[in-house]
Image (tube, grey):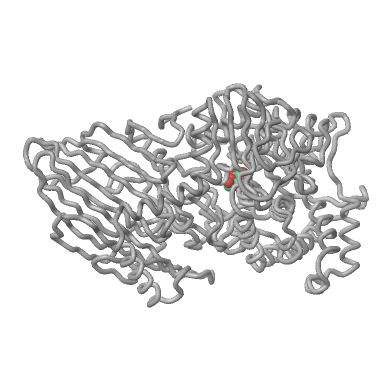
């Protein structure tokens, strides 16, 4: 394990700079406000290895598919979040020599992400050609004004003699996605002048919209403006100042970023950009920063999780919540949560099933229900795309995509696009989860019933009937465990298909006559669904009393992970793909993922037998795995195991467990720490509308406490060595269950 940041409750700080860790540092010091975000790359050019990345929510490009051998039905493009025009760029010269930390000698380096305030700072003292200058950089992406990015740089002359500091700052459109199939730039510059760049994504052959972005800079400084340079792709302004010994200079750069997502014609986009630039220019740096900090303070007030006695666990938890809030806070129902958020390009930046399976449970607990509802609406609004996906496979109904920006599938590996269809069940499950948690049936009985019906139509067409067995089956799928492809009767998929049909029939009984008419499900169709429910094959092994991951699983060479030499892990970096597929090793929860979803529907014996069996083969090489196993382990009172798995999920990126954080943070799995603590350690469940807990305190910890939003209340749960304490922070009194006993919450309760 490699730890490059210090352990502290509210900060991610390092005093060391190692070029080989540069990308890792950039990922871990990313900032975002849901609307846009950026990796923690340097403001100034860095000639070593780095990934300067700025991403704007919902601004993407359909990158034409590139595969070896085309198969019918392959998506034509992979949607990629576009690495935006670089508006952060600010270069510095000392007596005419350009600052470049890849080449310069410097000391007192400090890089600090303050998670409480969402501010990134960097400082160092550089010695160059007989001069010595201390630099301080500070930046934030405002949550008070989503279009605003702010940088403030100060430089103090620590040399014996005066120095001339030159700042060349601007907006640079010569930016490419590192991950581009044909190495093309996704942007064209449409208009460029002294302080702004308007760029548009290139035209495409796929009928997807082009996006325009406008960036306008504005400086606050006492430096003298000495030059202006506008070229085809960049605009630069030069400032100069002479500093006597110990004198300090300051420059502040504010950039307004607008896009065609909010302004539908070029004139209003420019007017909007000018208007916002003017608005923020009337405020001082401190006013802008205070407005930003106050909103972050409110967020933490509502959902901070405190862990006493284990700073590593505390830092991991806050880092995860920080990453989630920076990516999505539910302000824009057109957006979703990409697996890397605004921290990298891998996975294209699109929407995955991760949102429903991993993000929804957390957003339900930490914010108002509207946020989750927005996430559900996102899918409803993309139903047309889901019909296209099903049709591409020759099937009826709706197949929600594995990866998308617009509802159309854009992942082009056949084993995922065509086969990883469990996602359709997970998307249906999220609607049920929302309804179960909030008690609000208005979504499921309206938009949700349409989603359920169309998913059910897909399942009813995707199953086939095996005459020999007199049962329905689903062949040729990939379960969540992507270390196996093209398997028959994946228990997870079959279970979810059956459950969706069952739940849809239940919902259809409750919808209004008008909605029923719109859904137009005939009695024959319902009878057919019922037949599938009654005769769906679910692989089960009587001797082991386990649900079998798929038909062939038990015939594998079932050696546990402990038998694999350590130097061959992680498997995906050491074994051939073919060897992985034939092995029994499980990338992430498959049977256990569904058992987690429906945790109260299985007996303790069933949970134990399945957990004990699958745990020994699981390598957790997906970041989404450990949290689910942690909850299952906690449910079975395997407390040490639950805690070890929590540590893995909560510090996945901080400790770079999977050796891939250079690509960006695992934003959707940042939900894992909260899930493991709240559903695992505190044993939180919602059953028949009743909130219940069955907490334990990890041995290493002195206490933990979290706040949870539940049905118009905020409940605070504290678990320490004296017991479990529940406090109603706001809302009407509430009856909950603690260790199976009813407790009424109207003030501080201890049990
Ligand atoms: C996981 C998928 C997940 C994707 C994006 C993959 O490694 O196996 O389940 O959807 O990452 O997070």
Residue at 91% across, 62% down? 527
Question: Eyeballing the image, is 384 above or below 730?
Answer: below
Decide if residue 591 is in sight here.
no
Decide if residue 80 is in sight here.
yes
The image position of residue 277, as x and y in percent, is 32, 65
Residue at 61% across, 62% down? 378
Q: Is residue 144 left or right of residue 483?
A: left
> What residue occupies the far left of the structure in this picture?
161
Question: Eyeballing the image, is 687 above or below 652?
Answer: below
Q: Is residue 386 left or right of residue 247?
A: right
How many tags in the picture? Answer: 0
Q: Is residue 109 left or right of residue 686?
A: left
Residue at 62% across, 22% down? 699
The front one of 631 and 183 is 631
Residue at 57% across, 24% down? 702
The image position of residue 219, as x and y in percent, is 24, 59
The image position of residue 747, as x and y in percent, is 66, 40
Ligand 1: quadrant of the figure: top right
The front one of 670 and 738 is 738
Question: Eyeballing the image, is 3 above or below 535?
Answer: above
The image position of residue 69, as x and y in percent, is 59, 55
The front one of 219 and 493 is 219
Which quadrant is home to the C terminus? top right
The front one of 477 and 360 is 360
Question: Eyeballing the image, is 288 above or below 300?
Answer: below
């Amino acid at each position: 394990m490699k730890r490059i940041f210090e352990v502290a409750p509210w900060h991610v700080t390092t005093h060391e700079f190692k070029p080989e860790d540069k990308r890792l540092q950039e990922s871990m010091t990313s900032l975002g406000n849901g609307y846009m975000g950026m990796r923690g790359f340097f403001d100034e050019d860095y000639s070593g290895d780095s990934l300067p990345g700025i991403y704007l929510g919902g601004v993407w490009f359909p990158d034409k598919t590139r595969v070896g051998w085309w198969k019918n039905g392959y998506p034509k493009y992979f949607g990629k979040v576009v690495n935006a025009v670089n508006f952060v760029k600010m270069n510095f010269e000392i007596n005419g020599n350009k600052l470049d930390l890849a080449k310069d000698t410097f000391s007192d380096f400090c890089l600090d992400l303050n998670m409480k305030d969402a501010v990134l700072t960097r400082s160092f003292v550089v010695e160059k050609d007989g001069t010595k200058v201390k630099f301080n950089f500070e930046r934030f992406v405002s949550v008070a004004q989503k279009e605003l990015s702010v940088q403030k740089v100060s430089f103090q002359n620590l040399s014996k003699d005066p120095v001339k500091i030159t700042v060349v700052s601007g907006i640079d459109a010569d930016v490419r996605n590192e991950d581009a199939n044909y190495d093309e730039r996704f942007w064209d510059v449409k208009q460029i002048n002294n302080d702004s760049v308007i760029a548009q994504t290139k035209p495409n052959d796929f009928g997807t919209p082009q996006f325009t972005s406008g960036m306008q800079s504005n400086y606050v400084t006492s430096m003298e403006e000495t030059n202006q340079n506008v070229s085809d792709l960049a605009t630069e302004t030069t400032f100069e100042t002479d500093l006597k010994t110990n004198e300090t200079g300051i420059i502040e750069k504010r950039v307004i970023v607008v896009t065609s997502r909010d302004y539908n014609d070029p004139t209003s986009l420019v007017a909007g950009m000018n208007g916002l630039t003017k608005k923020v220019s009337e405020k001082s740096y401190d006013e802008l920063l205070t407005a930003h900090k106050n909103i972050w303070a409110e967020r933490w007030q509502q959902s901070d999780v405190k862990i006493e006695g284990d700073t590593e666990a505390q830092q991991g938890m806050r880092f995860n919540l920080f990453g989630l809030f920076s990516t999505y806070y539910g302000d824009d129902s057109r957006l979703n949560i990409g697996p890397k958020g605004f921290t990298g390009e891998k996975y294209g930046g699109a929407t995955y099933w991760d949102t429903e399976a991993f993000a929804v449970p957390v957003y339900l607990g930490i914010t108002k229900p509207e946020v989750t509802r927005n996430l559900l609406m996102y899918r409803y609004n993309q139903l047309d795309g889901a019909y296209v996906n099903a049709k591409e496979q020759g099937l009826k109904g709706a197949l929600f995509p594995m990866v998308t920006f617009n509802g159309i599938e854009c992942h082009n590996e056949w084993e995922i696009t065509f086969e990883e269809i469990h996602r359709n069940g997970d998307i249906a499950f999220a609607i049920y989860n929302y309804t179960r948690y909030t008690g609000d049936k208005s979504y499921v009985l309206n938009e949700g019933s349409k989603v359920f019906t169309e998913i059910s139509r897909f399942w009813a067409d995707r199953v086939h009937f095996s005459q020999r067995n007199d049962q329905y089956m689903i062949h040729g799928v990939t379960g969540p465990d992507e270390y196996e492809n093209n398997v028959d009767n994946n228990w997870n998929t079959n279970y979810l298909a059956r459950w969706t049909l069952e739940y849809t029939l239940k919902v259809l009984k409750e919808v209004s006559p008008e909605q029923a008419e719109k859904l137009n499900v005939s009695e024959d169709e319902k009878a057919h669904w019922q037949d599938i429910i009654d005769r769906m094959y679910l692989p089960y092994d009587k001797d082991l009393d386990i649900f079998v991951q798929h038909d062939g699983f038990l015939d594998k060479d079932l050696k546990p992970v402990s038998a694999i030499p350590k130097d061959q892990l992680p498997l995906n970096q050491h074994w051939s793909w073919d060897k992985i597929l034939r092995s029994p090793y499980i990338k992430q929860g498959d049977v256990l993922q569904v058992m987690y979803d429906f945790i109260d529907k299985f007996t303790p014996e069933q949970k134990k037998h399945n957990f004990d069996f699958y745990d020994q083969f699981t390598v957790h090489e997906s970041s989404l795995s450990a949290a689910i196993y942690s909850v299952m382990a906690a449910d079975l009172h395997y407390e040490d195991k639950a805690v070890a798995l929590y540590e893995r999920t909560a510090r996945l990126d901080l400790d770079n467990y999977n050796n891939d954080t250079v690509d960006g943070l695992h934003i959707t799995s940042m939900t894992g720490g909260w899930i493991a603590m709240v559903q695992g350690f505190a044993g939180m469940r919602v059953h028949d509308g009743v909130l219940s807990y069955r907490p334990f305190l990890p041995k290493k910890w002195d206490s933990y406490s979290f706040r949870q939003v539940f049905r118009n209340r905020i409940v605070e749960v504290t678990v320490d060595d004296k017991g479990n304490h529940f406090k109603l922070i706001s809302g009407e009194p509430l009856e909950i269950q603690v260790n199976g006993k009813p407790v009424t919450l109207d003030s501080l309760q201890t049990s």
